[in-house]
Image (spheres, grey):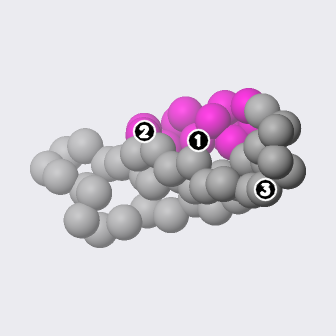
Amino acid sequence: MAKKSVASLQTGSKRLTKAIKMVKSPKTGAYTFVEAIMDPKNVKEFLSKK
């Protein structure tokens, strides 16, 4: 799980954060990465979801 504030995502007065988390596939058992760009306030909620 990672959280990164990227300078190119900070447009004008709006600050965005790119969150990346690893998700295990129930079918194959392989891990995949899910990326989302969101408001920094929503990152904890995104990372805690399964």
| Sooner in the amino-acid sequence: mark 2 or mark 3 | 3
Q: What residue type is labelled 3?
A: Ala
Q: What element carries label 2?
A: loop
| Pointers 2 and 1 in contact (C-beta within 8 Å) | no
Screen quadrant of the N terminus: bottom right
Residue at the farthest bottom position: 7
Q: What residue type is labelled 1?
A: Val
Q: What residue type is labelled 2?
A: Asp
Mark in front: 3 vs 1: 3
Mark 1 — residue?
Answer: 43
The x, y position of residue 41, in whole percent, is 53, 36
**Magenta region:** 38-49
Crowding near pointer 3: few (<14 within 10 Å), some, many (20+)?
few
Residue at x 14% of width, y 50% of height: 12
Mark 3 — residue?
Answer: 30
Screen quadrant of the C terminus: top right
The secondary structure that most of the magenta stretch takes on is: helix
Residue at x 24% of width, y 65% of height: 8
Mark 2 — residue?
Answer: 39
Q: Is residue 4 magenta?
A: no
Classify residue 7 by image quadrant.
Answer: bottom left
Q: Could you give the CA–CA distance between mark 3 and mark 1, rounded to whole angstroms? A: 24 Å
Is 3 located above or below residue 36 in the figure?
Answer: below
